[in-house]
Image (spheres, rainbow, N blue to C red):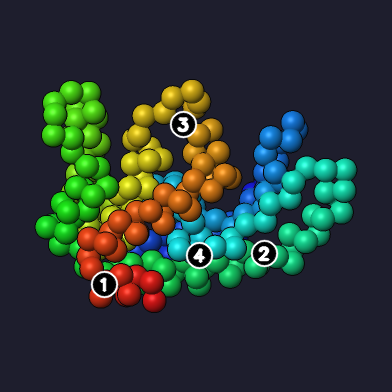
């Protein structure tokens, strides 16, 4: 289930998104009942972490015969979905203010997708990933408008993972939803920003954190 605001939010930087609260569970108990705040990035239909670097964005309730009495705790533990708009808009603004030069972009690529020295399947896979990310960065409307910024880097990696990366054992939509529910989206965004901050240095890192 998903509860969304009726209208999209557009930031001054041209990022259009819709904050929402979703809940998920499983009949066999393999997945804890989860209530989570998240954001749908409209231009690419990507699910993104609401705070990008914050924790405490979800509530998980293990399956038990008493769990139904604890569902009310989710209402107290989660902020109202409308509060997401201000938080995410601020995060977008801050990341758009962090410049990423072409040299830094290539350094990020080296750190994010290391290139094996020996020729073979691993090197071919790395080259293919880099080629797709380069196309997203330079030409794709889901990423290119923010090329040259930290937000553009985040967009490139997130869009690649949602729409371009090979998927095995499941449909792409199913895999994306599973990643959102289990915390893979947060880890992806945090890892991307951590790698970028190491490339940009302490000053940019402080700017991204603030």
Residue at (34%, 35%) from the top-left corner?
164
Residue nearer the viewer, 36 or 31: 31
Q: Which residue is mark 1?
A: 202
- Which residue bears the numbered disc 2? 78
Distance in Å between CA atoms under marks 3 and 2? 28 Å
Q: How far apart are the alpha carbons under marks 1 and 2?
A: 32 Å
Q: Are marks 4 and 3 in contact (CB under 8 Å)?
A: no
Whether pointer 1 and pointer 2 mark residues with C-beta atoms closer than 8 Å, the reply is no
**Residue that numbered label 4 is attached to:** 54
Residue 195 figure quarter: bottom left
Disc 4 to disc 2, C-alpha distance: 13 Å
Mark earlier in primary sequence (1, 4): 4
Residue under the image location 38 percent in, 37 percent down: 163
Answer with mark 1 or mark 2, whichever residue precedes in sequence.
2
Q: Which mark is residue 172?
A: 3
Mark 4 and mark 3: span between their CA atoms?
A: 26 Å
**Disc 1 and disc 4: Cα gap in Å?**
19 Å
For residue 12, which quarter of the picture?
A: bottom left
Give the left or right position of residue 68, taking residue 18 as reference: right
Q: Residues within 10 Å of mark 2 (few under 14, many from 20)?
A: some
Front: mark 4 or 2: 4
Q: Nearer the viewer, mark 4 or mark 3?
A: 4
């Amino acid at each position: 289930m998903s509860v969304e605001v009726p209208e999209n939010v557009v930031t001054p930087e041209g990022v259009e998104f819709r904050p929402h609260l979703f809940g998920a569970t499983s009949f066999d108990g393999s997945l804890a009942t989860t209530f989570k705040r998240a954001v749908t990035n409209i231009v690419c239909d990507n699910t993104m972490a609401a705070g990008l670097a914050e924790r405490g964005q979800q509530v998980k309730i293990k399956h038990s015969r008493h769990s139904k009495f604890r569902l009310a705790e989710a209402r107290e533990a989660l902020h109202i979905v409308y509060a997401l708009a201000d938080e995410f808009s601020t995060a977008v603004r801050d990341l758009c203010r962090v410049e990423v030069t072409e040299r830094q972009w290539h350094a990020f690529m080296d750190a994010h997708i290391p290139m094996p020295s020996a020729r073979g399947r691993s090197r071919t896979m790395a080259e293919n990933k880099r080629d797709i990310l380069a196309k997203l960065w330079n030409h794709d409307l889901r990423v290119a408008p923010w090329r040259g910024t930290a937000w553009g880097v985040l967009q490139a990696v997130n869009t690649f993972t949602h729409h371009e990366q090979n998927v095995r054992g499941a449909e792409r939509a199913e895999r994306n939803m599973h990643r959102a529910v289990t915390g893979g989206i947060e880890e992806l965004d945090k890892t991307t920003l951590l790698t970028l901050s190491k490339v940009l240095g302490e000053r940019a890192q402080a700017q991204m954190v603030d």
